[in-house]
Image (cartoon, rainbow, N blue to C red):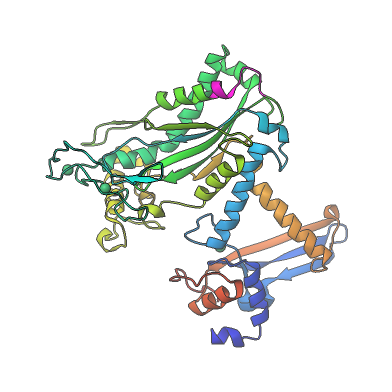
Amino acid sequence: MIARLHDPHYDRWAAQIRRTGGCSQPIHLRGKVEHIDRATGALLHRYSTTSEPGGVLRVRCKTRRASRCPACAEIYRADTYQLIRAGLVGGKGVPATVAAHPTLFVTLTAPSFGAVHLRRENNGKTLPCHARRDAGSCPHGRVMSCTARHAADEACLGEPLCPECYDYTGSVLFNATSPELWRRFTLALRRRLAKSAGLTQWELREQVTVSFAKVAEYQRRGVVHFHAVIRLDGPDGPASPPPAWATADALADAVRHAASAVAVTAPAAEDEPARVLHWGAQLDIRPITIGGELTDQAVAGYIAKYATKAAECVGTLDRRVSPLDDLDALPLREHARRLIAECFRLGALDDLADLRLTQWAHMLGFRGHFSTKSRRYSTTLGQIREERAEHVRAEAVSTGRLPLFEEDTVLVITEWEYAGQGYSLGDALLAAALTGTPMPGPVDSAGGGA
Ligand SMILES: [Zn+2]
Ligand SMILES: [Zn+2]
Ligand SMILES: [Zn+2]
């Protein structure tokens, strides 16, 4: 810390850090940008990191994971919010008339894999977890009842009443096959819509576009749920109105049908029989309406929040684990440890190799994307980021920090190379003070280049 403060390049270093906006693990880049006059070949402007402190430029890590970098995840969250909201009420190139299109907020759940401790509430009153007057004992001698009224932060939430009885195989296979289950759900949804309107699939495409944006949420028991905005547009996407028959009721019917109809089979492998995975019986379908019970802001906020989370609430690790790791030595919740061990056990079976369970053990088998959307939903994160970059560029030009070039006449050559990531402990403390962010935890990849 003292060495950094006395460094003659400290001011420039501090300016770099402020620009990363409190990123807790900035990426170090080495390279240059040259602006060259296309007609004459003259060098108009040159930036190189050789004159930067340590010879590197520190830029945001841009992760979506709040557990890794709160500052960058906050930007991701805000961008996702704008993206989702544009698909509900317009904006970002989507006309406001989209608000009148039938739109549902749908939650698809996982089935039960055994009784777990949970917090149940009714009208603000906490109810007993699993009160069963006539509860017998399981084959392992555990009474399958729990009369506790659990608090919201109790560690046992999501833990099975009997870990020996719990279907860890099913839980892991559900996570692993859920992206395919979702894909089949969207296909079945379109099929049902077409059928109920008396159309072929081809005719449906000429009348209706089904758009969606979805996010995965980990339950404390370690399985994913999907929350999705599903919207009906006309054939040209959000700018075109859907036909009169394509109502919210028709969409809800198609969602209900598709959710109950689809299944994915995990193949048999050695002693493991083939397993058929399907959605849980709990299905939540709610219309999104302006000024209604469920507003566009609430839905956009909800999806954006989950887009920055992963499996950390289950008590697993935020990084890959290997079958060579000693699971007992890692800071894991017992339930997460068993789920990870099950991923390793099934991942070693040849017939299940396609599920890549070993690589995704830290995610408890889920290897899908956390938030996805169909092409026509609204704008893209890339476009939102480009708008922001353009805004920053324009500001830099207007304040004289960047020269203004006619785009067509200038050739821009960029050359970047990765040179490390993160902070040394001293730099991390200084950066936290400079950007007003919380003091960092243990530093993972200390200091490359710093
Ligand atoms: Zn960051
Ligand atoms: Zn309980
Ligand atoms: Zn048992």
Q: In the rendered view, does 19 fall on the left or right side of 294?
A: right
Q: In the rendered view, does 161 fall on the left or right side of 368?
A: left
The percent position of residue 337, horizontal first and vertical second, equals 28, 54
Q: In the rendered view, does 415 fall on the left or right side of 194?
A: right
For residue 212, which quarter of the picture?
top right
Judge whether 92 appears above or below 325 on screen: above
- Residue 244 on the magenta span: yes
Q: Nearer the viewer, residue 147 or 179?
A: 147
Q: Quadrant of the C terminus?
A: bottom right
Judge whether 32 appears above or below 130 on screen: below
For residue 240, which quarter of the picture?
top right
- Residue 440 on the magenta span: no
Instruction: Residue at 83% x, 64% y: name it.
Output: 398
The percent position of residue 127, horizontal first and vertical second, equals 32, 44
Q: Main secondary structure of the magenta part?
A: loop
Q: Is residue 4 visible?
A: yes
Q: Nearer the viewer, residue 4 or 38?
A: 4
The percent position of residue 402, horizontal first and vertical second, equals 80, 66
Instruction: Residue at 33% x, 42% y: name it.
Output: 172
Residue sticking out furthest to the right: 40
Instruction: Please report the bounds of the magenta region as a residue range.
Output: 242-251
Instruction: Residue at 20% x, 45% y: name it.
Output: 162
Q: How many marks?
A: 0
Q: Is residue 238 visible?
A: no
The percent position of residue 216, horizontal first and vertical second, equals 47, 43
